[in-house]
Image: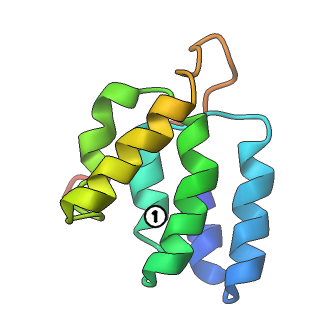
Amino acid sequence: DNFILSIKQTSSFDARFMQISKATRNTSFYMDQIHDILKQFNFSSERNKIRDILLPKAIDHENIRLLYDLYRFPSEQKRLNELLEKNPRRESMQIEPERISKKTE
């Protein structure tokens, strides 16, 4: 996906944060897309900042478990669920992002 590639190619966290912030203004994301974006960040503090702007834009709350491998501790998983509870489910009528194509090899 071009969006993921552009995030990978951007070196500073601040620039990556701005790039993702702009993308979230007018679109919603599937949990697998959020997962793939969050995987681009090695530090939990950075990952958490990105998580906090992406989760309110999640369409498929029922797939929150896709993020559990990034947040292994029960307290972190609880935080994920709390964030979703604070934000109503996004309606599918909104502009949806392109599905991230998975390479099959």
Q: Is residue 30 left or right of residue 72?
A: right
Count residues near mark 1 (Cα–Cα under 10 Å), then give few for <14, some for 14-19, many for 20+: many
Q: Amino acid at mark 1?
A: Leu
Instruction: Report x, y in % for residue 73.
Output: 21, 65
Q: Is residue 100 left or right of residue 14?
A: left
Residue located at (52% from left, 57% from top): 51
Instruction: Report x, y in % for residue 34.
Output: 47, 50
87 up-or-down from 64: above or below: above
Q: Is residue 2 visible?
A: no
Residue located at (57% from left, 30% from top): 87
Task: Work out which residue is located at the far bottom of the displayed protein and give it.
Answer: 11
- The residue identified by callout 1 is 38
77 up-or-down from 90: above or below: below
Q: Which quadrant of the view contains residue 29?
A: top right
Residue located at (50% from left, 27% from top): 59
Q: Which quadrant of the view contains residue 5?
A: bottom right
